Amino acid sequence: MRKSIFLIFITTISMITFSCKKDQFPDGKASKIVGAYVSSTLESKDRDFHVTHLYDNSIMSWCEGKKDSGIGENFGIDLDGNFSVHEIFIKNGFGDPAYFKPNNRVNEMEVTGDKGGKEVIKLADSPDIQSIKLKNVIEGRRLTFKILSVYKGEKWDDTCITEVAFKAFDIQPKKSILEGRSFPIKASYASIKFILHPNGRLEGSGHEGAQCPSMFEKGQWKTKPNGRILITYTTSYNTGCNPQNLSAAGEIKYMDNNCEIYNLPIKADEEASCKFY
């Protein structure tokens, strides 16, 4: 009888010990970045420094927006689940080589996981993609990066980062990322779909206008220095109205598969929407 009671007691203790064990997250590299936030963003009329540039695999960069060097500014990377992160890949500074030295680059950052772990990492003053092996495991769904010190820029006091990832990557030219992508634009009086082809050729289908529908004829596209896509195209009235050709031009802002429309006639419609596929 005493032996039975003792065995039951030992079994119970083992069960309690196991149930209190710390959660174990998948080891290794997060499979997908699903979002990001930043404490500030540099405002500019010429270029776009949107938070999505931190993980869009392009030379487009995020730059902090404080009036000083950005010490204390931070950004967070959201993963598609809880992970134990051992290695971080970073492309430091401004992605465009012509603006790497003129702008600040990160020297040291503090990395923190929302489920545990913290470490100060030091980056090289180099435009190359860097692999940072962590001494401490960082765990969680969100990793926060806080700027502690910078390499000073030769011209501007803005601190920039091109890309953050948790697996090896190659930076692609912005144009190659966009080639082959389609973006339908829908409005109350228009439904037109554009496809970006190599060498600047723009394909389109659909119509604009309600009483006098105009059909897409031909067009071109190119990427501007500010990262927006400039499209120019011609439509023609085929039926219902006096035959004529009309030219249109405008800009599309690419943001993590979403679009913003600038200057196109369709923009005047409050219901106009745009999305990349």
Image: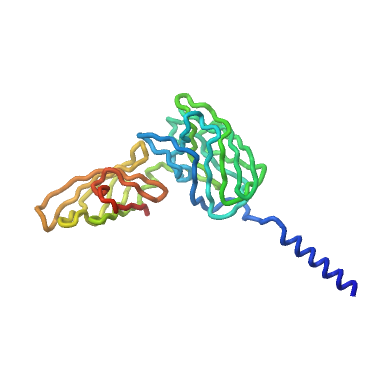
Q: The C terminus lies in which quarter of the figure?
A: bottom left
Q: Please state the horizontal and vertical placement of residue 150, each as a whole percent of the image.
A: 55, 30
Q: Please state the horizontal and vertical placement of residue 86, each as a whole percent of the image.
A: 63, 46
Pick out the residue farthest to the bottom: 1
Quarter of the image where one finds residue 8? bottom right
Residue occupying the point 58% across, 50% down: 29
- Indicate the colouring scheme: rainbow
Residue 201 visible in rendering: yes
Q: Is residue 240 left or right of residue 177?
A: left
Q: Is residue 34 left or right of residue 274?
A: right
Residue occupying the point 52% across, 52% down: 32
Residue 199 visible in rendering: no
Q: Please state the horizontal and vertical placement of residue 114, each as a whole percent of the image.
A: 60, 48
On screen, 146 above or below 202? above
Quarter of the image where one finds residue 191? bottom left
Pick out the residue farthest to the left: 242
On screen, 25 above or below 69? below
Count the numbered circles shown.
Answer: 0
Nearer to us in this view, 220 or 46: 46
Pick out the residue farthest to the right: 2
Pick out the residue farthest to the front: 270
Residue occupying the point 54% across, 51% down: 79
Residue occupying the point 26% across, 51% down: 269
Nearer to us in this view, 87 or 207: 207
Nearer to us in this view, 11 or 207: 11
Q: Is residue 21 left or right of residue 4?
A: left
On screen, 93 above or below 172? above
Q: The N terminus lies in which quarter of the figure?
A: bottom right
